[in-house]
Image (cartoon, rainbow, N blue to C red):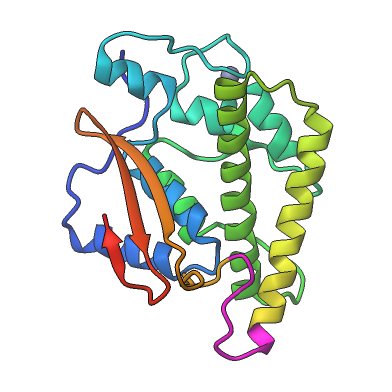
Amino acid sequence: MKSALKTYQDHTTEAFVEKWKALWKLKIHERYKILIWRIANGILPTRLTMAQKVGLGDTICPFCRGCEELIDHLFFKCSVSRALWFGTSWAIQSCHLTVLNYEDILQLIIEPHVVSNTTLDMQRLREQTSIQIATTLDSIWNLRNQVVHQDYKFNILVIIKNLESRILEHFHVLEESDSIVDTPIRGMERWKPPDAGIVKLNVDAAFGNGKFTVAVVARNHQGSILKV
Ligand SMILES: [Zn+2]
């Protein structure tokens, strides 16, 4: 089994580092950045990735069950994903997006190709497009996880409506954040310590280098790390 997409071969090149810097600077939810990071490093635990590491297991796309769960299929070419991209007001035809490798996905987010014949601010248009793409990828991944882990039976129209609402809310938050200096964007707040006596856990998981890794950071009310 081989993935159609390639990961970065050299993670130390200047160009690579610059791309990551650009990703972390984007005005999008931190969770989206982590998702893009996992995709671009080829460590998103899709069925195919897991089966490649373990040597066995179901590799079929949980949405259509007609193709292997490759990254480009899952996020751009599957009938369900295409419906999500195309179903919102922006009607994106995801199968026409140029995604030949993982780097292209990162590029889509940090430097989306936007064309406008209006007087709209191009920088703002790019920011909105980054939000739109990142939110859609996040929505697809969340839906996929619900289907895989909870056998979730979904109504595609409801999913599309929710996705559109999330994108528009994110646009609105972006507008608001520009009018208030140094105020974190809602939903992208910096980490806050818990109340006294409470231990707060931040959790993330990744599959890579043959190991499934769960990172847990425990902090007390003073923000001190108790255990990692
Ligand atoms: Zn599919």
- Displayed quadrant of residue 45: top left
Residue 144 within the segment the image draws in magenta: no
Give left or right: position of 153 versus 218. Answer: right
Splitting the image into four quadrants, where does ligand 1 fall?
A: top right
Magenta stretch secondary structure, dominant: loop
Q: In this view, does 91 lie to the left or right of 177?
A: right
Q: Where is residue 153 in the image (x, y as percent from the top left)?
A: 73, 20
Q: Quadrant of the N terminus?
A: top left
Q: Give the residue displayed 36% in from the left and 31% down from the top.
A: 5
Splitting the image into 4 quarters, where does residue 209 fall? top left
Q: Position of residue 155 (x, y in %)?
A: 80, 27
Q: Which residue lies furthest to the front in this view?
A: 197
Rendered location of residue 219, percent (x, y) = 36, 65
Q: Position of residue 47 (x, y in %)?
A: 42, 20
Looking at the rendering, in which quadrant would you find the C terminus?
bottom left
Please tell me which residue lies in front, 134 or 190: 190
Residue at the (68%, 23%) spot, across then down: 152
Q: Which of the 4 image quarters holds residue 7?
A: top left
- Which region is colored magenta? 178-187
- Give the camera-side residue of 182 and 26: 182
Q: Which residue is drawn at 57% across and 43% down?
A: 137
Whether residue 119 is visible to the viewer of this picture, yes or no, is yes
**Total labels drawn:** 0
